[in-house]
Image (tube, grey):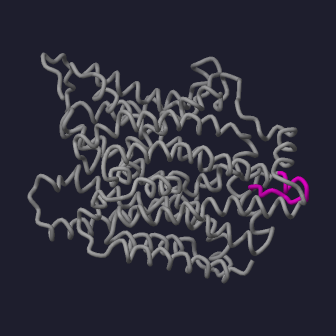
Amino acid sequence: MNPAIIFSVFIAYTALLFVIAHFTSRKSTNDTFFKGNRKSPWFVVAYGMIGASLSGVTFMSVPGGVYTGQFTYMGIVLGYVIGYAVIACVLLPLYYKLNLTSIYSYLETRFGVHSERTGAAFFLLSRLLGSALRMYLVVFVLYEYVFKTWGIPFWVPAVVFICIILLYTFKGGIKTVVWTDTLQTTFLILAAVLTVVYITRNLGCGIGEILKASEAEGYTKLFETDWTHNKFWLKQVLSGAFITITMTGLDQDMMQKNLTCKNLRDAQKNVMTSSGLFILVNIVFLSLGAALIYYAHQTGFPLPVNGSGVVVNDKIFPSVAFSLSNFTAIVFVLGLVAAGYSSADGTLTALTTTFCFDFLHFEKRGFSEQQITRYRKWIHVCFALLYLLVIILFRPFHNESLIDKVFDIAGLTYGPLLGLYTFGLFVKNRKVNDKAVPFIAVASPVISYVLKTYSKELLWGYQFGFEILIVNGLLTFLGLLLFSKRLTQAPC
């Protein structure tokens, strides 16, 4: 496909985002940027959350992952439902009761300022790395299929993407993100559905026939029953639940959108609606993966491989989409660009919010509206530059499916948050040594990393998957318990 056409599609979609940003940022204030004025319709947030949760990694790695992981990803998706229920029933009531802007302010209330900044720092690290890798995947594909053919270096599209996201979130912040996420979700889902429809028509068969053939070849296997396997079904379900609790419920990016709802009840309706939609959307993406592999087998299309001859899962969707027709190539680019924006715009806003409220304590220092605006804008720009730096530096290390790498990062960086919130919510009769919290929070992921790396040797062949997050959280919890003392009166 002509790279100029792809670039034109990218420009047209970006222009549409700026139209939305224009209308959502009019008469905006700092309250608009950080809280969306607490006026977002719950159903708009629920729909937009799908795009924010999927990201470019899901868009490409979930369909491509069917080649090696079959449909076992559905175990994680089912765990998501459990996690969303915990968020709706336990975390959201807490956040609304305390009227939080940054959810890590709770840690100061419960433990102290060192705990607050520790939790916020782990979020900044995790989101900066995880979201940058999601964005990297989008930039990588556009570079491979557009900019590379023009002789333009990789860093150029990375700079372009970050500048665009910085510009359209600069004024409206979270209010703009809530509404642009609806556009991202629409194009993400359309890209998957239209590609499946095109493949079925091209091959003259229905999706049912494709899934039946895929089942015969073992690609639709839902549950891995080998307990030592890193995709064992129980591990997948538990991991999905805790991934959702941490990567959504303890994540400022995701919760900041939920906290723009008018009240607690609307926020809860939003979360539970999102969980149901998320199951349906992931079924679509897994079916897309089966269709892509079936198409390759039926037509003899060579799946993309690396220098060692191993199939690269992340390249399956783009390689098939670009080979089918101009239509599927355009649909893919639209979905990919939507995924890229949705994974980065909210994150950039959340990073800014967390730093402003958990490190600079805007709400306590008596800053004027003009001072808050000035500081907020400079911080926003600085995080955009850090975001860009991570994307560029990761380029030499992309040699496997990014969805596993993203979850590996999450397992190590969100574990301390899981331990902190679990202790804070359920252990009311003990006071933690606040100054010890940073050391506990660093030690736990280090120990977890060693366990994950050498688990086969230490645990009779057992391999840790995403459930290392649970172990990490437990280690943090035990560390907090060790460095605490009994209270005569429980904290609120």
In the depicted structure, whether residue 44 falls above or below residue 82: below
In the depicted structure, whether residue 308 falls above or below residue 174: above
Q: Residue at x 46, y 26 (%)?
A: 471
Q: Residue at x 28, y 36 (%)?
A: 438
Give residue 268's position: percent from left, percent from top.
40, 43
In the depicted structure, whether residue 220 falls above or below residue 227: below
Q: Residue at x 73, y 49 (%)?
A: 287
Give residue 100's position: percent from left, percent from top.
25, 47
Quadrant into which the C terminus falls: top left
* Residue 253 visible to the viewer: yes
Give residue 184's position: percent from left, percent from top.
53, 64
Q: Locate residue 232: give its quadrant.
A: top right
- Examine the structure image and report whether residue 303 is included in the region drawn in magenta: yes
Residue range (magenta): 294-306
Q: Residue at x 34, y 21 (%)?
A: 478
Relative placement, left or right, of 62 versus 169 is right
* Residue 449 visible to the viewer: no
Give residue 413's position: percent from left, percent from top.
42, 40
Q: Locate residue 19: give its quadrant.
A: bottom left
Quadrant into which the N terminus falls: bottom right
In the depicted structure, whether residue 85 falls above or below residue 3: above
Relative placement, left or right, of 141 versus 129 is right
- Examine the structure image and report whether residue 341 is included in the region drawn in magenta: no
Which residue is situated farthest in the left direction here? Answer: 366
Relative placement, left or right, of 102 versus 391 is left
